[in-house]
Structure formats: C-alpha cells, structure tokens
Amino acid sequence: MSLAGEPRRLSNDDEGVEPLAVASAAEGEEAWTPTSALIPPHLQKYLDSFDRLNPLQSKAVPVVLETSGHVMVVAPTSSGKTLIGEVAALRSIVSDGKPAVWLLPARALAAEVAQIARRWSTHGIRTVELTGETNMSSDAVRQAQLWVATTEKFEALYRRASLKDVIGRIGAVIIDEVHLVGDPARGATLESLIARLRVAEGRTRIVALSATVSNAEELAAWFNADLVRSAWRPTVLTTQLVPYDAPVQGKREDYESAKDAVVLPLLRSLLGEGLGSATPSGEGASPSSAVVFCGSKAAVLRTAARAAGVPFRGVEPEALVESCFRRGVGIHFRDAPRARRALDAFRSRELRVLVATSGLSTGVNTPAKFVVIRDLELGMTPLEVSQAQQMFGRAGRAGQESEGFGFMLVPRAEEATWKMKLLDGYAARSRIAAQLGDAILAELLLGSVVDRSSARAWFEQTLAFAQDGSAVDLDGVIDALVQRGFAAEVDGQLAPTEIGTLTSRLMIDVESAGEMLRALAELPIPATADEAEELVVQTVATAATSLRERPVNERTYSAYVDQLLTGWSPRVIARAGEQFGARVCMAASQLVLRSPARMRENLPPGVSMAQFRRAAEDLPRYLAWVAALGYVHASTWAPAVAGDLSRRLTWGHLSPHPERGAGRLLWMLERMLEPQHHRDRMQDLWRRARGAGFASPDAINARPRGVDVTAEGFAEIVGARADIQLQPLIDLELTYRTPNPAARITALSNTGANRALASTRPAHGPIDLVLPARSAGKVAADVFFYTRDGDFGYDSLVADLAVDIVSVTPVEEAGRLVEDLPEAHSVLPHSRGVRRLFQGERKRLRESILPLTAPDPRLAPIAAALSERRSEPDAAVVALRTNLRALLRASSRTDLRSPRAVLRAREASEAEVQITLAALLASLQIDAGVATSEGHPLAVVRLNDRWALAGPRHARPGRIEPLIPAVLPRQIETVPAPATPSTVRAAPRCGWMVQFAQQSGT
C-alpha cells in the first residue's frame, strides 16, 4: 500500500485494501439554482449567506415551500440538508405564523444548529436550545418561535402538562437523521413521536431529513410523506475495507495489538512519515487530515498515543492529551480533557489527526480527507451500518476537502459479511416492540389512548405495524401496565394511575419503575442516616436498567469501586449482588456526596473519573422519581432521603459542598431562579444563603435580591414549604398544624416490634393512627409530610395508650368499606364447575383471570384494612389472608365472580377466595398473581425477589403450574407467619430523619 504524498483513489491492485464503493461528485450533472429564484423575498433576509442552492436543495426546497404535507428528504451526508431544515422552519415561523421544532439526535449537533438559527434573532425570531444539559421554564419555551432540541428532551416537554397549549400550535417538526428511528437505544422514542404526529395532518407538519437509507420508500410511505431523493454529494467519497488477521483466541491485548499493526501503517501511508509531529515533515508533504473512530475511550487514548509516538500505559489522561496534542494528534470524547480545543485545532488544521469515539460522527462538522473506523463495536454494542455510514460521511466535507476516503478495519473472516452489509446499505427497522409499554403509557398520559380499541388504532400508526402488521401482543402489554399499577382499567376505560403519570412524565421506563416499586416496598428500616442513603442509592442503582447495565470494565474498575464502598453497610453491599454497573453508581454517589476531595486524586491505571461523574449525573432523575412517591403514594422515609440525595448530587459542585439535609434548602433556591439561569446563578445564591446561616428553607421569609421569582411567586414558594407541627395525641387521633394542605401525611405507628401505616391526602384534618393488633402501653409514631411541590418534613411522638381505648377490628373496618363498593356482575361460568375452568386451555384462562386480579383502586382501602396496614410486606400478606377468610363466609358456588362481587356478597368459594386475595394484594402494589394445582387456583405473591404462595394451599399436594406470571420456580413455599417479635419498647423508628428534614431556621 503506497499512499504517501497527494492521495489518489485506490485500485484493486493496492495490497490489503479492498475498494468498496465510490460516491461520485455530481457537480455538473444536476443544476445549481440562484437562491432568489426559489426562496420567496420575505424569507431571503434570513438566508442571505447563500447565493445559490445546490442540486439537492434545488430539488427539495420547492417541495418544502409549495406543498403542505409531510416531506422526507434522503441524501448523502454533507449534501446540504441543513438548509432544507432552515427553509422548513422559516416557512412555519414567518409564512404560517406558527412555532417550529427542530429535533436532532445529539447535544453537540443541537448546539450547532441552535448557533446557526440564532443569527435570525436580529430579525425577531427567538430560539431556545433544549438538551439534557439545558433547562428552560415553560414560559421561556412558550415565548420561543424555534425550539432546537434532542428527541428525548422534546418528548419530555411534550408530556409536560403546562405546555399542552403551545404543543398544539406547532406548525412544523424538522426531524434530523430520521433514519435513527431504527436505532436500538433511541429509535422507539422517535417512532412514538412520529406515530403521534403523522395523523395530525392539519396541525403539525413533519419535514424529515435522512442520510442514505435503503428503505426510504417504506419510511416515507409510513408517515405519508412526499419523498425527495438525491445521490448528489459535493465531493467524491471512496469507502474501502482493510482486512486484518485477528487472533483466533487470546487476551484482549492481542486483539488490540492486531488492530494497531494495521492502523499505524495506514495512517503513515495516508499522511506521510510526518505522523506524530505537530507540522508536516519534508518538502511537499501532504497537508491532509484524518479522523480515527474508536469504539471506546480506552481505544481512543491507546490509538492516539500510538499515532503520536508517546507512551500511554500508566499515564494520566490529562498528561497524555497534552503529549499527543504537541505531536499533532487530538483526542475527543465526552469528558476528555480539553476536547473542545482538540476539535477547534483540527478544524483549523493545527492538528492533522483526531482520534475520537462515535459521538463525533453524528452531524458535528469535522471535515477530513480520511476517515478510519478502527473498531466494529461501540462499547459493548456491535457497530450498525448506519453508524458506519455516518462516520464515513465525515470524509470529504464540502468547501474543505475535494474528495474523501473512508477505511474500515475488519477481521479477515468478516470481510465478506461487512462488504455485503455496506453494499446493501442500512434499512431502518422498528424498535418500538421492546419499549411498547413505555410508549402506550405515554399515549395514556397524553389522552390519545383511552381504551384498548384506541390503543390498537394508535399502534396502527407505528412503523412496527407498517412493517410487521399486528405481530405484537398489545393486550398483553396493557395487561402488564394494569397489573403493575401504572394504568387502571375501569369499565373498559384506560387511564394512567398517579404512579403511571409520574413515571411517564419523568421518562422512566416502566420496567425500571416497576422494579423500583417492588424493591422500595421491601426495604428494611435503616438503623442510621448513612444506611438510609446507601439503601436508597443501592435500590435505585440495582432496579433501573440503564444504571444496572452501565458498560463499565469490571476488571479495570473493580478494585477502586470496592475501595470506595469499604465503609458501606454490609447488608447494602449484599443487596447489590453481582450488578457491577449498580456498584459503580453507588461508588459515584460516595465520591460526590461524602468524598468530593477524592475526585481530584490520582487514579489507578485505566480508571477515569469521568465514568463516575456520568454515573452521578444519571442518578438524580431516578431519585427524583422516588422522591415524588412521597406525595403520590403512601410512603415513609425513602422519598425524603431520595429527595435530599437527588438535589445534593445535582448540585454537588457547589461551594461550600452541600451536606446531608441541604436538599430542602436547594429545593427552595431552585424555585427562586428560572431553570435557564440555574447554571449561572445558583452558585451565588447558594453561597449567600449558607453565608447567612440558612440550613433549611423554613426561616427564609424575605425574597433575596437577584432572583427571578416575583414577590407573589416567592409567597407561593413559602406557602409550599413542608411546615408541620404535631399536637398532643388524643386517643388515636393525630392532629397537627400546617399552612399547606396540598400535602400527604403518612404516619408509621408502633407499639414495640409491630408497625402499621396510616396515610391521608390532602392534609386537611386529623389522621387516625392505626394500632398493630393486641396493642397496649405506649404508642410511637414517625410522621412524614410530603408536599405536592416537592418539599418534605418529619416529626415524631410517643404517647401513652388510654386504658379504655377501643379500636375497630380490621374485619369490621373492611365490612363498612365493602358497603360502598359499586355493584359488579362479571361472572366466569363453566358448565362443569370452577375446577374444570382452571383445567382449561392456559392462554384463554390467563386472558379471563387477568382482569379479575388487576389492581383496582376501589379495592385498595379494603385491602389496607384487611392487611392491618402493616408496613412489612410479609406481615401484610399474612394479615390480609387471615382477615379475608374471617370476612367471607364459605360458599360452594360453581362459577367465579369478580373480587368486587365476592366482597359485596361477603361469601366466597375457595377459588373465589384465592382470586380475591390476589386482587387485594395487587391493589396494595404488591406483585401478585395466580397459579393452579389440580385444577384449583392459588394466589401467589413476590416477596424479596422470590415467588411464594400467598395462603396455605387448600388442595391436595400436586404440581403447581404457573398462570400469572407465566413462569414460576419449581419449588414454591407459603409465605410464613412472621416470627413472634421480642419485647421492644415503643419508640420512633426513624429518628435519624431529622438529619434530612431539618426544621431549624438558621
């Protein structure tokens, strides 16, 4: 291979390089058009930097301006699609008087487009940039005429109730890189959004921009778009495979070395022998540049060091970056030291080589003569054809390089496969099936799905339906949402529950939310504030899929992570199990919350502090979800701790460092500033508050200077504080004083070892404490106060029980509640009795039983009464099964009625008892189901991540067959009665909560 000097197009005679494809320049083959001929006069002032439109733009702009339907433009990278997006946005804003949205797949690309659009501000067009790194108030978003956003951020705004009116006025949505609808990670969100918009012909227009995709006609037909295609590209692009001999087996170092042996000679051939020097060497040396894409940060550092000729083992990243930069090689990845400097120097040709991860390939302007794709995996994920095309597209950028060359390293054994993949091109396939529950829950929130029929109608708008018809179990997905408490189905009508609404608004996937709910319900009461923090972080990190499955090299990081977690509670470490991603998140919280000084220490070889910073950045969203459960759900200590942790992690960079209990103060300060000012002004506000001696919001009664909130708004913040004072207990009536009734009060009472829970919302009047069975002597209560706006408070008491106190029994209370149940007539008959019914075909039986055992909010008060409001899940199950049998008379009915009908009748067959038991447990947000044995139904329940029989089995011993869920362990035991507790005095169990819910003033 000889490519020194001026590059040339490679031929089949070049050793070791397989020419794959040539994308020829089309200049001269298609017409260029003066801008004034196609752009209306009233829009020309916004596009005054363009004298003429290239062939693609000349073809697409008339369609965008002269038609009103959806449009899809498909063309190679660097062909000028951004201008087409600008024209679509300007038509909507200027010509039609409607705001426009421009969606992009990456923060960096959104920032570039926002910068382009800001030049329109001189003509009165307001632009806001909305990404994961930027926040805006609803008012600021409402006042803008152009939103430049990542897809995920826009979807989150779409679900925000306060923006419903402005969402309805959007005239156009420009979707950049629409082919990413087939992306495994983000495709489902984009597909859901397009499915929602595609039927809104009269409201919102879609203008989709796409790189070359092999099924463009299918995509355009899906959302009824006019398709504009062009093969025009301003430069010649030749893509080529470079096969190498990968080791058959060996250590990772052997695989990396095999690629090094190919990449370095290739770069020297392309750039000359001056590789590794800041300036080209020799007369007439090539001024060309190269971008090398690697699959991991470790590979970036290694490859850059090899190219620069400097050592990399045991060298700190900052030092390595500087050494490489001095020798003409830049390093770029998220959190890389001085990554912006490297990118700017490469663009100005101060650097000839830039080594980067794949994030640089998505639209960011990095013109280069050569592109080299080193790895076929991005992290732990195989490289997609679309990603390879994006990377190749960085070669030969318009106005920078006249031609470009793309090289991909492939193991020789995979050469034929990759050649076929690249020649066939990328076909976007639907990814929504794997996240269908999240998508349906979002539509329930938005009101576009209200029952199963409208769910099917919505699904028919998806790409999944267009490509595969009805090849999904839509009813099964809805059943799962109902069964797990995210949706309620009453009389055929579907609606999100409060927890479902919270989950969808915060963009938490239902799988993670369901696991968090289950794990939170089983948390033990911590012994200390330290253990409380650790339990909450561990629960979230283990339950949330994206945290648990973080792609971190365990071999490299394990020793350092173990060192950080040395002081953690042994039972917390045991609960984390083998989930290394979760342990990394736990270690990240340790660094930010308790050991911030260690974030500046020297790290072991291969360990990057950026990995921990990103983990700490990802935790607050999930912790905020847990925090919101305090108001939404009858919760005790965990939401308060999560709220404190969430804010302290978010603001961990402030000085002085936010200590435990600072979350409430941060809550108030956040609300005094508009979200878009948090980054610039929070530090000063925090410093002033702490300097004035404030540790909580309770004594801040005067509006500080330099805040955004008005006097009226400040008064609302003051009124939203968690201000509560407990009054002396009278009998079992807990009274309190609070100026904020928009709150939930939850009391955890105990008379020793046994605990019970009572909760009320709104906080208008007294709350009756619930006594555990057979109580006497003293009663203690931990009282938690959660406001609708996100603040929390805590107090506790101990009181003597009156000798003559009379409490209503659980059965008596449930009996009174049953009288208020609406009538129910649903019956599952069988000509040969219930036993034959449960010996029938499993799929049909499952479909019949699922609605009977789904969580029903009307049953929740009855279930709480029968469970004696026990706070421990196993104790609640035992109490509920015992009291349910005491409530219901035995019956020999041969049909099967709904739980509501059974409870109203106060009698039940054994089969009906089991089905009703499962339904009541589900209404308590306990994971419950039904199994069968010898034709008899059996209620089952999931506790401590194990399935068990909810009640003693009544049938003769026989094989237990799963029904709901579809899989159960072979050995399944009955939930045992709790052991008789040892004598423990009545006392508050969460006294350490005062460290989080400080009620002091200054």
Image (cartoon, rainbow, N blue to C red):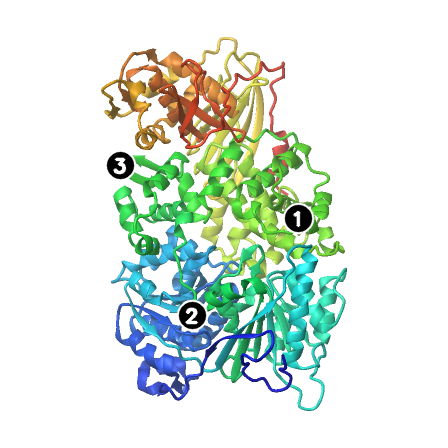
Q: Secondary structure at mark 2?
A: loop
Tell me where residue 497 appears, x and y as whole percent.
38, 39
State the residue position of label 3: 492
Q: Amino acid at mark 1?
A: Glu
Please tell me how many numbered marks the rendered image carries.
3
Say which quarter of the image contains residue 156. Answer: bottom left
Relative vertical location of residue 97 with respect to residue 950 in this rendering, above or below: below
Q: Secondary structure at mark 3?
A: loop
Q: Residue at x 67, y 72 (%)?
A: 264
Question: Of residues 648 and 433, which is closer to you in this image?
Answer: 433
Q: Amino acid at mark 3?
A: Gly
Tell me where residue 907 appears, x and y as whole percent.
31, 14
State the residue position of label 1: 554
Say which quarter of the image contains residue 895. Answer: top left
Relative vertical location of residue 442 with respect to residue 892 in this rendering, above or below: below
Say which quarter of the image contains residue 56. Answer: bottom left
Q: Quadrant of the C terminus?
A: top right
Tell me where residue 723 appears, x and y as whole percent.
52, 37
Q: Is residue 653 visible?
A: no
State the residue position of label 2: 211
Tell me where residue 475 appears, x and y as whole percent.
32, 40
Q: Is disc 1 in contact with disc 2, using a CB cutoff of under 8 Å?
A: no
Tell me how far mark 3 sits from mark 2, CA to CA: 44 Å
